[in-house]
Image (tube, helix red, strand yellow):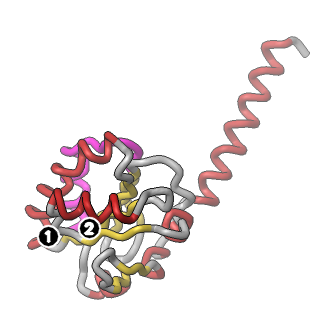
Amino acid sequence: MNTSIKWMVAAGIAAIIGLTAYQQLAPTKGAMSQVSFTTIDHKKIDFADWQAQGKVTVVNFWATSCSTCKKEMPNMVKMYQELNPKGLEYVAIAMNYDNPEYIKNYVNEQQLPFNVTWDQEGRLATQFGGIMGTPTTFIIDKRGNVIKQYVGEPNWDDMYSVINKAIAA
């Protein structure tokens, strides 16, 4: 077998392995109803309660050390303020490597109006498929299904469209 064919076969095998691993790590349908957390202001939240109320949820994994996360946060606040009255919930999940004091200071300085939690043990990142990089954002429908995932700053028009369709459904 010549060298270029060997490389193509190796690349194909690597792609199949990567896709299989991603599918195994990706959250399963309805799995988000099992997610719960405590906010930095000690409020217990269960996604199942939001689903029972017919809420669409945005979950944003972020870090105070992430410049893209800080850049997108004002847009997240604006989106939350516009769409929360229509049925949107939002949680910002700070990564386990973040400093809890930095998180609290950032939340207070920016006056974030939505739920914020610190994923101290990395449990939430694992439940969402092993989040490694920030920002990573998920949109979850009223039944607890992940309907969209963004890695990096989202396309805001697309995000609004996906959320509005999910709220209307």
- Along the line of sight, the residue nearer the viewer: 76 or 23: 76
Return the mark for residue 90. Answer: 2
Q: Is residue 45 left or right of residue 33?
A: left
Circle 2 Cα neighbour tier, 10 Å, few/some/many (<14 / 14–19 / ≥20): many
Number of labels in the image equals: 2
Residue 108 is situated, as x and y percent measured from the top left of the image, at: 19, 64
Residue 62 is situated, as x and y percent measured from the top left of the image, at: 37, 54
Question: Residue, x 32% and y 41% (percent of image)?
Answer: 68
Residue 74 is situated, as x and y percent measured from the top left of the image, at: 16, 50
User: Within the image, what quadrant is residue 109 found in?
Assistant: bottom left
Circle 1 Cα neighbour tier, 10 Å, few/some/many (<14 / 14–19 / ≥20): some
Q: Amino acid at mark 2?
A: Tyr
- Along the line of sight, the residue nearer the viewer: 20 or 169: 20
Which residues lie in the magenta part? 150-169
Residue 28 appearing in the image: no
Q: Is residue 73 above or below residue 16?
A: below
- Choose the circle earlier in sequence order: 1 or 2: 1
Q: Main secondary structure of the magenta part?
A: helix
Q: Is residue 103 above or below residue 56?
A: above
- Along the line of sight, the residue nearer the viewer: 149 or 65: 65
Quarter of the image with the C terminus in it: bottom left
Return the mark for residue 84. Answer: 1
Is residue 79 shown in magenta? Answer: no
